[in-house]
């Protein structure tokens, strides 16, 4: 299992310049490779192989006067940037041929120095962790890291990023074994919403914190000040950074809150079932701001990889399943109901239901049925549902270096207790997602 550990990095003035140079060189190599393949396609030539493209845009380019400055950064950075281009093309081709499931993947696009996020990735031969806790990056130097926890094993790769707020982060990818929790005696189904962020099958309701709505007044004032600045001026850049920092605070608060909630649910439940939601579709309605503020997709992703990490069962119930139409007591399907109907009474057995609580109990029953059946059996399931199992991707794609035969260093000896930093972990785990839509009772 691969986990990601994210730590704040504080480079010095000279190191910021070196990182900016590395960001720029990685971007240029990516764009040169993309341009070379586009020109070859326009000329009717064969697709340029990966090795030939690397020789053309890195090895040969360093010998020219126009690209001689590529030698000022680590070659690992350039090779990994070109590897990102190869991955983007493969994903695009797989999407065209249908081998890649899900939404269609667009072809690679050129990167800009004005992108809100700049990053470089290094494998094991381009970085190391010093005994004093500093992170050494080739041709950049020793970076000061705000450690919040120990690394369980030697990282296979690190990604150094700079976000729109000007903050620097080091994201380590570590190969480690799952941390299995003691068995819990309860299962839970979760119904996600806007008024209540989550309603659990046992009746607990978690209010939506609405971080963006609470920061809206301040953001409005800051964005108004930004719009009044002259384009291209230093004052406009300062105002832009202020807005970016405020948005980063909102995102950090939401992420921290969701991490705590998802961890608590995973620890308390042996199996977790949640209904899939089309956040992309709902993001095109009048509820768009509230939907994006809720962050359902990020929360479900946290539940999924934490369940794999801690040995819990996890399954998704297809959004076509009529969880709000079925009576959780007798199984009678009472028909669709408008959103303003929050409570209803079953016409068959007369049971009074809270709409969200009833939906959560139905999700729990359907999730148990999916896990017990092990495959999709219903009429409204997709033809491919239940026939394949795929690795759940990590939250960001990372390249790793094999560590076979090398000793594992457990932890960093210089971490101080009480230090805090936002961290994100992600995993690749074998998790099957099932599609189903008929009523079934527990």
Image (cartoon, helix red, strand yellow):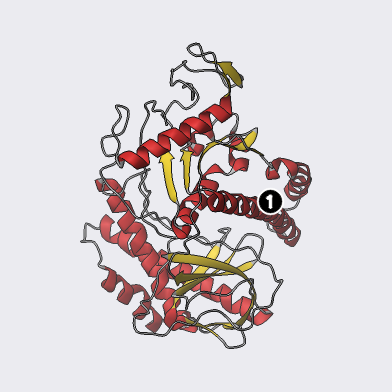
* Residue found at x 55% / y 17%: 351
Dot 1 falls on a residue whose secondary structure is helix
Q: State the image coordinates of residue 354 (x, y, percent, origin top left).
A: 60, 24
- Quick one: quadrant of the C terminus? top left
Q: Crowding at label 1, few (<14), some or many (≥20) Cα neighbours within 10 Å?
A: some
Task: Work out whether 130 lies above or below 34.
Answer: below
Farthest-out residue, bottom: 131
Q: Is residue 368 above or below residue 47?
A: above
Query: Relative to 10, is 142 above or below?
Result: below
Whether residue 318 is visible to the viewer of this picture, yes or no, is no
* Residue drawn at (29%, 41%) of the image: 386
Q: Nearer the viewer, residue 273 or 98?
A: 273
Which of the 4 image quarters holds residue 263? bottom right
Q: Position of residue 51 (x, y in %)?
A: 27, 73
Q: Which residue is mark 1?
A: 250
442 lies left or right of 351:
left
Q: Measured along the vertical axis of the image, is residue 31 above or below residue 55?
A: above
Q: Residue furthest front?
A: 185
């Amino acid at each position: 299992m691969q986990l990601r550990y994210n730590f704040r990095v504080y480079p010095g003035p000279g190191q910021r310049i070196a990182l900016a140079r590395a960001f720029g060189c990685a971007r240029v190599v990516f764009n040169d490779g993309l341009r070379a393949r586009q020109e070859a396609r326009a000329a009717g030539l064969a697709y340029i192989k990966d090795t030939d493209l690397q020789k053309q845009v890195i090895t040969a380019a360093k010998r020219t006067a126009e690209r001689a400055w590529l030698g000022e950064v680590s070659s690992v950075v350039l090779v990994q940037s070109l590897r990102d281009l190869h991955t983007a093309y493969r994903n695009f081709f797989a999407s065209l041929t249908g081998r890649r499931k899900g939404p269609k993947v667009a072809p690679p696009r050129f990167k800009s120095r004005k992108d809100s996020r700049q990053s470089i990735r290094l494998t094991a031969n381009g970085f190391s962790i010093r005994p004093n806790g500093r992170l050494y990056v080739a041709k950049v130097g020793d970076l000061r890291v705000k450690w919040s926890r120990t690394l369980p094993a030697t990282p296979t790769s690190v990604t150094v990023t700079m976000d729109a707020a000007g903050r620097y982060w080091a994201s380590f990818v570590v190969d480690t074994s799952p941390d299995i929790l003691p068995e819990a005696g309860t299962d839970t189904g979760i119904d996600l919403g806007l008024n209540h962020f989550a309603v659990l099958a046992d009746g607990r309701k978690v209010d939506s914190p609405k971080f963006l709505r609470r920061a809206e007044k301040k953001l409005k004032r800051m964005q108004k000040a930004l719009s009044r600045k002259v384009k291209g001026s230093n004052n406009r850049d300062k105002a832009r950074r202020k807005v970016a920092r405020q948005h980063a605070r909102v995102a950090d608060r939401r992420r921290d809150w969701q991490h705590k909630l998802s961890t608590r649910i995973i620890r308390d439940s042996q199996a977790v079932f949640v209904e899939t939601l089309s956040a992309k579709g709902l993001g095109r309605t009048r509820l768009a701001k509230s939907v994006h503020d809720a962050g359902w997709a990020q929360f479900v992703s946290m539940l999924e990889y934490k369940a794999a990490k801690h040995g819990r069962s996890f399954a998704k119930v297809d959004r076509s399943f009529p969880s709000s139409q079925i009576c959780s007591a007798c199984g009678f399907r009472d028909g669709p109901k408008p959103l303003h109907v929050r409570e209803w009474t079953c016409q068959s057995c007369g049971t009074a239901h809270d709409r969200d609580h009833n939906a959560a109990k139905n999700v729990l029953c359907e999730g148990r049925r999916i896990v017990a059946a092990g495959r999709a059996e219903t009429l409204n399931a997709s033809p491919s549902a239940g026939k394949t199992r795929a690795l759940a991707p990590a939250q960001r794609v990372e390249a790793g270096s094999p560590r076979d035969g090398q000793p594992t260093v457990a932890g960093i000896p210089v971490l101080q207790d009480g230090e805090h930093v936002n961290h994100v972990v992600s995993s690749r785990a074998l998790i099957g997602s099932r599609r189903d839509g008929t009523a079934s009772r527990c």
